[in-house]
Amino acid sequence: QVQLAESGGGLVQAGGSLRLSCAASGSILTINDMGWYRQAPGKQRELVAAITRGGTTSYADSVKGRFTISRDNAKNTVYLQMNSLKPEDTAVYYCNADHIGWGLIRNNYWGQGTQVTVSS
């Protein structure tokens, strides 16, 4: 089993910045893709940013140029630097990780979520 623990959420004014962290722990063999998703009230969960083990990144159009995803493979940790935050970025942010274990068994894990609130 792999556990994901997010931190760094909070309340910030529009135009401000926050940095989210997500650390994986447990019986880790290899973590491939990692990503951040978000879910606002009444909306579906959406992909915000993703990063491969090799560092290739992708972003939702709504956050391009404002958010940066990065990771530290040695620490099994993924980060999301969020700048120029807007009220529409308000959501619960979830970390996601794709793990390959012994026997090439693949599992996908979610964190518990961290609230990000951007006031206008």
Image: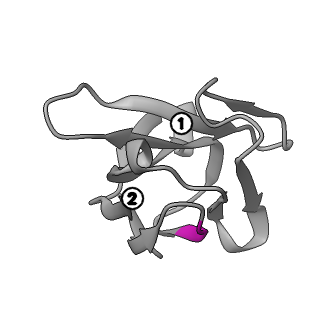
Residue kind at label 1, given as amino acid type: Val
Q: Which residue is mark 1?
A: 48
**Three-letter code for the amino acid on which mark 2 is drawn:** Ser
Q: Where residue 117 sits in the image (x, y, percent)?
A: 34, 62
Left or right, 70 with reference to 92: right
Compared across the picture, whether 64 is left or right of 100 comes to: right
- Sequence order check: which comes first, mark 1 or mark 2? 1
Residue labelled with disc 2: 120
Q: Quadrant of the N terminus?
A: bottom left
Specify the quadrant of the image occupied by residue 10.
bottom left
Question: Where the C terminus falls, by quadrant?
Answer: bottom left
Query: Front-most of 92 and 90?
Result: 90
Q: Which type of secondary structure does the marked residue at label 2 adopt?
A: loop
State the image coordinates of residue 9 (x, y, percent, origin top left).
Answer: 41, 71
Q: Is residue 98 among what the camera can see? A: yes
Q: Quadrant of residue 111?
A: bottom left
Q: Which residues are magenta?
A: 16-21
Residue at horizontal 55 percent and vertical 55 percent from the top: 85
